[in-house]
């Protein structure tokens, strides 16, 4: 029998939840046949069988397993432990009492990687936590529950209820009915990564204004040439300009990791998209080598798959830089949060006609603001300013973007 382990479906995945088995226990499966639906930290996706044979399901639907843990087995025949036979006497066979903490053979407490990390961050001893995972394994929810159950100070006697006040105070009664909503795995990942970014990256922000009149004129020409086909959006212009500038500024296309700079040979630009009740960032790979039209088609297709829930983990991985645009809501400028471990993120504001001074006269021009948030550990002030200025230069002289 060959084990079917929980696969690593994204670069940040540490565990996955089995949503639905597409085959039943004991079914025959063929290699490449859809086997199970898995919820990861980035998306839900279907996993295919890598071998043919008879399926023996090990983990049930709803169970969360660490990457590499066994979900099922596939082999020529279903190998199962023999059913327990009743003792000759009429008395039933007593089951052994479960151990309070399951340990691995080397003496280490059995726990998922996520559970170990959270326990370490919160100063919890894993040996004091009761595991509810397969075989007594300690999972993330066990550690979180243990942290919540451990009071920081001895509980005080409950005070007498305070009289109601007109303002409602801080009590729930003043807010009306309160409902709680559990976060999806994707929302949990977004929350964790954004908190990690703000806690660990010493960021700084710079901004400038871009004259987009030439880009507006070029887009009008491209729209006429395209006929019924959609023309590149202004965000596609920004993605292309950023990709070309990233090639010239390698540290903007890198990351700070463990006291070292990581510089990447590929320029993969992530595009922030609102979808699935969370922020999702699909990746345009090798954006510096693609035409403006190719970037436009790919970005549109990725956004549609995000909104329909059909995006796959590989399409959300390996980004080296991120562009975030909420200018369509009339927002002139905003400060985004760096997508770790990337060195920087670029925010795009609203494109509109505004009065500007040109040659001593006030004229109306199409402008928008670009805001760059950078990790100061790898991208310093002067480098960030030069990088952002290069993006502006490419947008104000956009013919190169259309080549």
Image (spheres, rainbow, N blue to C red):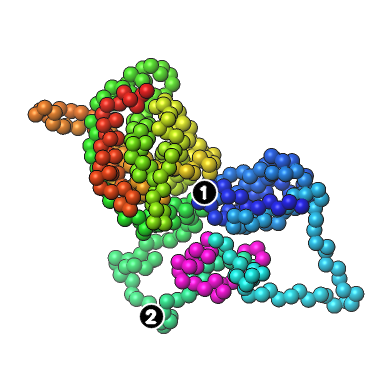
Q: Earlier in the sequence, mark 1 or mark 2?
A: 1
Asked where in the image residue 95 lies, by quadrant, the reply is bottom right
Query: In the rendered view, does 133 fall on the left or right side of 29?
Result: left
Quarter the C terminus occupies: top left
Name the residue carrying label 2.
Answer: 159
Residue 292 magenta-drawn? Answer: no
Residue bounds of the magenta highlight:
114-135
How far from the left and from the top, in percent, is residue 279?
43, 46
What residue lies at 72% left-to-right and 41% top-to-bottom? 31
> Main SS of the magenta segment?
helix
- The label number, if any, that marks residue 368 in the structure image: none
Looking at the image, residue 258 lies above or below residue 324: below
134 with respect to 370 (left or right): right
**Label placed on residue 11:** 1
Q: Residue furthest front?
A: 260
Q: Secondary structure at mark 1?
A: loop
Q: Is residue 56 visible?
A: yes
Residue 140 seen in the figure: no
Rendered residue at 81%/50% (across/down): 77
Instruction: Let me know if residue 129 is in the magenta part.
Output: yes
For the point 33% across and 18% down, the residue is 221
Residue 28: give x, y in percent of width and height: 78, 44
Q: Residue at x 76, y 52 (%)?
A: 1
- Is 309 situated left or right of 291 in this image? right
Give residue 134's position: percent from left, percent from top: 65, 63
Mark 1 residue crowding within 10 angstroms, few (<14) / some (14–19) / many (20+):
few
Disc 2 packing (10 Å; few <14; some 14–19; many ≥20): few
Query: Number of labelled discs?
Result: 2
């Amino acid at each position: 029998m060959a084990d079917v382990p929980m696969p690593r479906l994204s670069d940040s995945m540490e565990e996955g939840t089995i949503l639905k088995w597409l085959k039943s226990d004991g079914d025959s499966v063929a290699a490449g046949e859809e086997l199970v639906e898995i919820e990861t930290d980035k998306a839900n996706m279907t996993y295919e069988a890598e071998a043919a044979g008879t399926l023996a399901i090990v983990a049930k639907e709803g169970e969360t397993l660490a990457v590499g843990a066994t979900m099922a087995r596939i082999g020529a025949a279903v190998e199962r432990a023999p059913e327990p036979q009743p003792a000759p006497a009429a008395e039933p066979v007593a089951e052994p009492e479960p151990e309070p903490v399951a340990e691995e053979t080397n003496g280490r407490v059995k726990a998922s990687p996520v559970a170990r990390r959270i326990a370490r961050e919160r100063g919890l001893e894993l040996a004091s936590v009761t595991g509810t995972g397969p075989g007594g394994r300690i999972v993330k929810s066990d550690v979180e529950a243990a942290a919540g159950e451990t009071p920081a100070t001895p509980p005080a006697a409950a005070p007498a209820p305070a009289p109601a006040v007109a303002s409602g105070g801080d009590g729930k009664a003043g807010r009306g009915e309160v409902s709680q909503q559990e976060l999806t795995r994707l929302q949990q990942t977004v929350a964790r990564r954004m908190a990690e970014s703000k806690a660990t990256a010493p960021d700084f922000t710079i901004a400038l204004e871009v004259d987009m009149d030439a880009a507006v004129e070029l887009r009008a020409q491209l729209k006429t040439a395209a006929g019924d086909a959609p023309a590149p959006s202004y965000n596609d212009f920004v993605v292309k300009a950023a990709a070309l500038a990233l090639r010239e500024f390698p540290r903007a296309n890198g990351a700070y990791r463990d006291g070292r700079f990581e510089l990447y040979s590929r320029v993969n630009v992530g595009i922030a998209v609102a979808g699935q009740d969370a922020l999702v960032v699909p990746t345009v790979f090798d954006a510096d080598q693609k035409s403006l039209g190719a970037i436009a088609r790919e970005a549109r297709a990725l956004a549609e798959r995000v909104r329909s829930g059909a995006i796959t983990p590989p399409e959300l991985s390996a980004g080296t830089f991120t562009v975030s645009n909420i200018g369509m809501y009339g927002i002139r400028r905003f400060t985004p949060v760096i997508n770790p471990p990337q060195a920087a993120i670029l925010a795009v504001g609203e494109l509109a006609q505004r009065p500007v001074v040109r040659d001593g006269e006030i004229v109306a021009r199409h402008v928008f603001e670009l805001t760059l948030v950078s990790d100061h550990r790898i991208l310093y002030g002067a480098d960030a300013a030069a990088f952002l200025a290069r993006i502006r230069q490419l947008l104000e002289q956009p013919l190169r973007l259309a080549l």
